[in-house]
Image: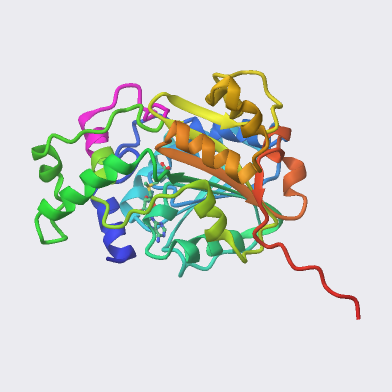
Amino acid sequence: MDSDDVTRLYENFPYPSPTADSGPIEDVANGLGFLIQDEDLTGWRVLDVGCGTGHRLLGMALRYPEARFTGVDASAASLVVAREAAQRHGAHNIEYVGGTLPRLSLPRDFDLVVCTGLVHHLPDPEAGIRWLSERLSPNGLLYLWLYHLLGEHDRLLDRELVQLLRPSDPREPGLETVKALGLALSDERYGSHSGTSVASDEVRDVAEADAYLNPIVHAYRFGDVAGLCQGLELEWLAAFSVNNDRGSRFIDLAGFEDDPYLCVQGPELVPPTLRERFAGLDRADQLAAIELVLRPTGFSVAAGRGKALDLCMPALRGNVFATPAQRRPTTPC
Ligand SMILES: C[S@@+](CC[C@H](N)C(=O)[O-])C[C@H]1O[C@@H](n2cnc3c(N)ncnc32)[C@H](O)[C@@H]1O
């Protein structure tokens, strides 16, 4: 299986919505408000890689009209919908580029690179993250959203069963196999609504195709991402959020925020007698404990270099758990 097989799926089922009538999806735009201190991102150059039908990109572009956005996707059918949706909503600050990672050549000067739901469908996720990190300006910030291994365990087993029973011709979409097995994905699976006011049958079909028919799927824990980023020119890697069917919450290991519905700090997840022990863990182990308790379906991280960390919210700075590009101190000669 390679990228062309993945692209074929999204040509048949443009994600997240095959119609330009669906409204913008706000979750990533909302997340940026908790990630970055700058309130309007004036002059920022933002790249959304694997933007699909662009409903999340549209949410960002309308929220931040003073920023300039570039959306990239391998699926031509998805970009047709994305362009139409942008036009309908009067978003004039987006340009779209068709192309496949990591072959595609693009400038290396983006202030923010957003990539939601793509890396886990790449044949070589490490090469994909390298390509993303290479698109950053010297002070650039990377935002990644990925499937989480623990909360996705059962769904990935269901997907494996579908792959065994689906028609063997890969050109057959295979959705009837998903339906015959009675599989369905809840709207709340990743903690936020699909973004359309009422999920139409078409939108549900796309969500189920994405969940069960994808030829390539990986899933990760926080620690795995540190491994994927190892050796890249990223000076820090921080946990940002976790999702499951009970909601989406930001991570706040250093305890900056005061809202348990909005943020996960960690100690509150374990019995009072174990809180001191939790507090004594390093950040990577605190994150491991959090994911073992919450078993998220999805999660996000931020990474960057130069001044990017100073541009982020204090809570994010308290969540740094790895330094991928850390160089050994040089011995003076
Ligand atoms: C699950 S969708 C995510 C869409 C959007 N980012 C969102 O979160 O709503 C994954 C998208 O990545 C695109 N894609 C998959 N492999 C790609 C590649 N190698 N290069 C560029 N785009 C790719 C697919 O065409 C699809 O639109």
Where does the image place residue 332, in percent across and percent down from the top left? 90, 76
Give the answer, above or below, for where 275 lies relative to 5: above
Tell whether 83 sits left or right of 311: left
Give the answer, above or below, for where 23 lies relative to 54: above
Question: Residue 206 falls in which quadrant of the image?
Answer: top left
Q: Residue at x 58, y 43 (%)?
A: 285
Q: Quadrant of the C terminus?
A: bottom right
Where does the image place residue 201, in percent across and percent down from the top left? 20, 30
Which residue reaches farthest right? 333
Where does the image place residue 216, in percent across and percent down from the top left? 31, 57
Q: Nearer the viewer, residue 7 or 53?
A: 7
Q: Residue at x 42, y 65 (%)?
A: 124
Question: Residue 210 falls in which quadrant of the image?
Answer: top left
How many numbered circles does the render carry?
Answer: 0
From the image, give the main secondary structure of the stretch colored magenta. loop
Give the answer, above or below, for where 79 lies relative to 234: above
Magenta region, residue range? 191-205
Tell whether 231 sits left or right of 191: right
Q: Residue at x 60, y 60 (%)?
A: 133
Where does the image place residue 65, in percent across and percent down from the top left? 61, 35
Residue 239 visible from this viewpoint: yes
Tell whether 159 sits left or right of 238: left
Which residue reaches farthest bottom? 333
Give the answer, above or below, for where 47 lies relative to 66: below
- Within the magenta stretch, is there residue 203? yes
Q: Residue at x 62, y 18 (%)?
A: 259
Which residue reaches farthest front? 273
Q: Nearer the viewer, residue 118 or 321?
A: 321
